[in-house]
Image: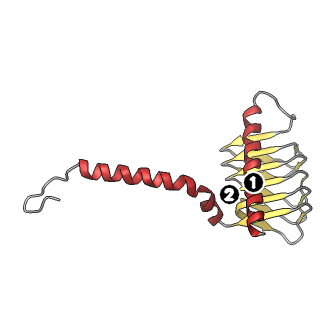
Amino acid sequence: MKKCVLLAALLVCLLGFATGVSFAESANIVSHGSHDHVSFGSTIDINEGDSASDVVCAFCSVRIHGNVSGSMVAFFSNVSVDSGKTINGDTVVFGGKLALADQSHIDGQLVLFGGELQQAPTAEISGDRVVMEGPGWLLFVLLPFLIPIGIVWLIIYLIRRNRYQFPAYPGGRRF
């Protein structure tokens, strides 16, 4: 049963990220709403009294002081929701921190993978939630990329070590 939940959560995270990336690529051509927020590497602030339709963020932070009427996808990003504020759609956070203040509310489903959930006692999540906290899950996902990188590094290290001779110092040995 745990394997099914793990695979389902991973699939949801990857689909959420793929949807966010495809949305971010098409945001310059076709805007789904006048209040969509898409960012790569910079902070998104939704101010008090403002509302946002959909929010997509990669390698940045999201501070919600207003309401989000659509869904939110955050990839390696931190998200903070002020007290009394609502995210009406689904929320996906991959490799980041989600902080829900008092009286904040997520109407849709929550998927948090490889990050941290800080939920106040009065914060509420209406839909289903899949929460896999901790950076160990990210290592599990990134391991297929780390192994080839390590092999390439080892090959380069061995070639450079044999190619360059260290100078002989007077009175010392040659290595």
Question: Quarter holding the C terminus?
Answer: bottom left
**Between disc 1 and disc 2, whose residue precedes?**
1
Judge from the rendering whether residue 152 lies leftward or rightward of residue 59; answer left or right.
left
Q: Check disc 1 and report its element: helix, strand or loop.
A: helix
Judge from the rendering whether residue 125 lies leftward or rightward of residue 135; answer left or right.
right
* 98, 11: nearer the viewer: 11
Q: Is residue 42 above or below residue 3?
A: above
Q: Check disc 2 and report its element: helix, strand or loop.
A: loop
**Which is more foreground, mark 1 or mark 2?**
1
Tag shown at residue 11: 1
Q: Mark 2 = which residue?
A: 95
Q: Quadrant of residue 118?
A: bottom right
Q: Residue furthest left?
A: 171
Q: Residue at x 78, y 62 (%)?
A: 99
Q: Position of residue 129 (x, y in %)?
A: 84, 63
Q: CA distance from mark 1 to mark 2?
A: 15 Å
Q: Residue furthest top?
A: 29
